[in-house]
Image (cartoon, rainbow, N blue to C red):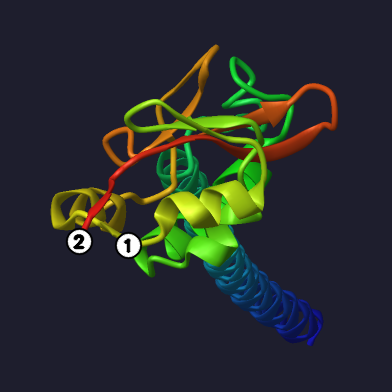
């Protein structure tokens, strides 16, 4: 009887050992699976973060490149404007002949050109800085003298063509004045009155 009981106890202990062993194996398997899941999640998160960082870097680089292109285009446009109007700081472009700024001189030159090409002697007579010497050797002391001189005269076609081609931009200038056309008109500043005006005019010929 004691042997049977002992045998039963031994069998019970063996069963418990087998169950515990199985449970340990099952726990180890669960731990391994949990570890694999954690590693997979970490890898996925790292990949997503890396991809997002790369995309953000690429977007920033694209934005920076676009801004650089815009800045460069603006600089090129400004350079083109400066080229069309002389230097980038050319307000004293005609300083050799006058203290008036470039814009004022060129605006006035455009008015003189208009009066000349339209043969508007009345307008021209008001622009002259008197006295002025006309061809061949006639001195006009005032507007009335000039109008009398122009009586019966017209501007030669070649002189009109030269003045019509005048752009009134970046004109030749020296200490004697500022040249329009091929020298049909010169303008300058009266140092006594501080006014711009015509200091020499030619092209008037007998009809």
- Image location of residue 60, percent across then percent down: 57, 56
Q: Is residue 169 toward the left or the right of residue 20 in the image?
A: left
The quarter holding residue 113 reads: bottom left
In the foreground, 99 or 142: 142
Q: How many marks?
A: 2
Q: Element at badge 2?
A: loop
In the displayed structure, would residue 166 be above or below residue 175? Answer: below
Mark 2 vs 1: CB contact within 8 A: yes
The residue that appears at 33% across and 39% down in the rendered structure is 184
Residue found at the very far left of the displayed protein:
158
Q: Element at badge 1?
A: loop
What crowding class fits label 2: few (fewer than 14 Cα within 10 Å), some (14-19), or many (20 or more)? few
Q: Which residue is mark 1?
A: 152
Q: Quadrant of the C terminus?
A: bottom left
The residue that appears at 59% across and 15% down in the rendered structure is 96
Q: Which residue is mark 2?
A: 207
- Image location of residue 100, percent across then percent down: 72, 33
- Image location of residue 200, percent across then percent down: 47, 32
The residue that appears at 43% across and 48% down in the rendered structure is 168
Labelled disc at residue 138: none
């Amino acid at each position: 009887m004691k042997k049977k009981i002992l045998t039963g106890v031994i069998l019970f202990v063996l069963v418990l050992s087998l169950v515990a062993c199985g449970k340990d194996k099952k726990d180890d398997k669960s731990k391994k699976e949990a570890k694999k899941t954690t590693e997979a999640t970490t890898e996925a998160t790292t990949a997503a973060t890396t991809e997002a960082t790369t995309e953000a870097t690429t977007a920033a680089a694209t934005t920076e490149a676009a801004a650089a292109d815009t800045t460069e285009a603006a600089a090129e446009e400004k350079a083109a404007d400066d080229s069309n109007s002389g230097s980038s700081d050319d307000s004293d472009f005609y300083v050799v002949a006058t203290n008036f700024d470039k814009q004022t001189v060129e605006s006035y030159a455009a008015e003189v050109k208009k009066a000349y090409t339209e043969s508007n002697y009345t307008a021209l007579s008001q622009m002259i800085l008197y006295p002025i010497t006309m061809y061949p050797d006639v001195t006009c002391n005032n507007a009335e003298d000039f109008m009398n001189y122009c009586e019966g005269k017209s501007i030669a076609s070649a002189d009109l063509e030269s003045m019509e081609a005048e752009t009134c931009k970046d004109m030749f200038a020296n200490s004697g004045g500022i040249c329009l056309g091929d020298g049909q008109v010169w303008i300058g500043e009266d140092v006594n009155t501080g006014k711009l005006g015509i200091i020499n005019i030619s092209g008037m010929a007998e009809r």
